[in-house]
């Protein structure tokens, strides 16, 4: 990895270690609206969950998805590069000890990834984490070796076009005989990969780094490494979902997707 990416990766890990306690308190085992309304229903269906599947949970955080996958009967190997988050994950999934293996692994490190085992996983999942990684090329390069033939990689990310670090949330009012309120997103940047400081949670102790990439970056990286795209969902909050903050994501932005979820499949 190039030196500047290595520095950014270290910076990212330090931020996640520092934010681990607050992240765990906020997400717990129940998750937030982003997870429960936008991500989990689509992830579950795209993973086509069946008991005894072996799933690799990439950048598992405090184990929110890991426990749900185990609850559905899957065997799960889950990793994150933040040791404090892995410790929280272990405390939350004690009931599923026989189904879950946790590891501390850096997804930007190919040899650490290979230590997970070759041709071992039916599917892999990364929920809301690829945009937190300084470099996703080692992961896309290694996954075909870790997955079984025709294995899948399902990932959710903040929508690169509507929910990147340049996005400004706007509310405007106009009068055409009655008062109308319009919520919109203004985006000034999309095409060129870019990194910027940001907050996953409003009260987190340390800002993290977001790595914005256009959708074609993710898909082309998959295609280059032997995947095809065979599932794709753009997810917006239904109108009835309240905003958690006046201009935060919620039902007022029901025509603008905050999250995109893709399933890529290995073709032999
Ligand atoms: C927004 S959190 C999502 C966590 C979890 N997937 C969930 O759904 O709750 C992003 C996660 O990516 C992890 N992460 C970022 N870069 C990583 C890397 N290079 N290797 C492993 N984990 C990484 C962070 O430690 C953090 O746990």
Image (cartoon, rainbow, N blue to C red):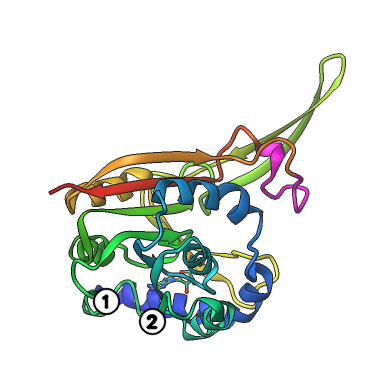
Mark 1 and 2 residues: CB-CB less than 8 Å, in contact?
yes
Does the segment drawn in magenta span residue 86?
no
Element type where label 1 sits in the image: loop
Q: Position of residue 10 (x, y in %)?
A: 40, 80
Predominant secondary structure, magenta span: loop
Element type where label 2 sits in the image: strand
Q: Can you see residue 166?
A: no
Q: Position of residue 95 (x, y in %)?
A: 55, 78
The residue positioned farthest toward the right in the image shown: 178
Mark pair 1, 2: CA separation: 9 Å
Place residue 54 in its image quadrant.
bottom left
- The total of numbered circles placed on residues is 2
Residue situated in front as seen by the camera: 76 or 156 = 76
Which of the two labelled residues, at mark 1 and mark 2, occupies the earlier sequence position? 2
Mark 2 residue crowding within 10 angstroms, few (<14) / some (14–19) / many (20+): some
Quadrant (top left, top right, bottom left, bottom right) of the N terminus: bottom left
According to the picture, the residue beneath numbered tag 2 turns out to be 103
Does the segment drawn in magenta span residue 244?
yes
Residue situated in front as seen by the camera: 149 or 19 = 149
Mark 1 residue crowding within 10 angstroms, few (<14) / some (14–19) / many (20+): some
The residue positioned farthest toward the left in the image shown: 268
Vertically, is 200 above or below 166? Answer: below
Q: Position of residue 84 (x, y in %)?
A: 52, 85
Q: Can you see residue 243?
A: yes
Image mark for residue 79: none
Vertically, is 73 above or below 95? Answer: above
Q: Residue at x 51, y 43 (%)?
A: 188
Q: Residue at x 49, y 81 (%)?
A: 86
Vertically, is 11 above or below 147? Answer: below
Q: Which residues are magenta?
A: 242-253
Q: Position of residue 25 (x, y in %)?
A: 68, 75
Image mark for residue 116: 1
């Amino acid at each position: 990895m190039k030196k500047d990416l290595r520095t950014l990766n270290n910076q990212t890990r330090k931020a996640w270690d520092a934010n681990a306690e607050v992240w765990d308190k906020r997400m717990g085992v129940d998750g937030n609206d982003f997870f429960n309304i936008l991500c989990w229903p689509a992830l579950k269906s795209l993973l086509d969950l069946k008991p005894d599947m072996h799933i690799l949970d990439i950048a598992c955080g405090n184990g929110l998805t890991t426990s749900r996958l185990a609850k559905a009967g899957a065997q799960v190997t889950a990793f994150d590069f933040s040791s404090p988050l892995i410790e929280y994950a272990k405390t939350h999934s004690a009931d599923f000890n026989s189904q879950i293996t946790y590891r501390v692994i850096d997804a930007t490190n190919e040899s650490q990834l290979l230590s997970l085992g070759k041709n071992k996983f039916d599917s892999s999942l990364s929920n809301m984490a690829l945009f937190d990684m300084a470099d996703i090329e080692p992961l896309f390069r290694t996954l075909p070796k870790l997955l079984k033939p025709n294995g899948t990689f399902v990932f959710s990310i903040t929508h690169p076009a509507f929910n990147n670090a340049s996005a400004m949330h706007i509310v405007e009012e106009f009068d055409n005989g009655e008062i109308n309120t319009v919520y919109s997103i203004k985006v000034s940047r999309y095409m060129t990969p870019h990194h910027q400081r940001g907050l996953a949670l409003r009260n987190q102790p340390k800002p993290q780094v977001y790595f914005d990439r256009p959708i074609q970056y993710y898909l082309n990286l998959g295609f280059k490494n032997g995947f095809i795209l065979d599932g794709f969902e753009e997810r917006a909050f239904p109108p009835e979902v309240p905003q958690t903050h006046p201009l935060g994501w919620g039902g007022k932005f029901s025509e603008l997707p905050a999250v995109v979820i893709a399933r890529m499949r290995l073709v032999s």
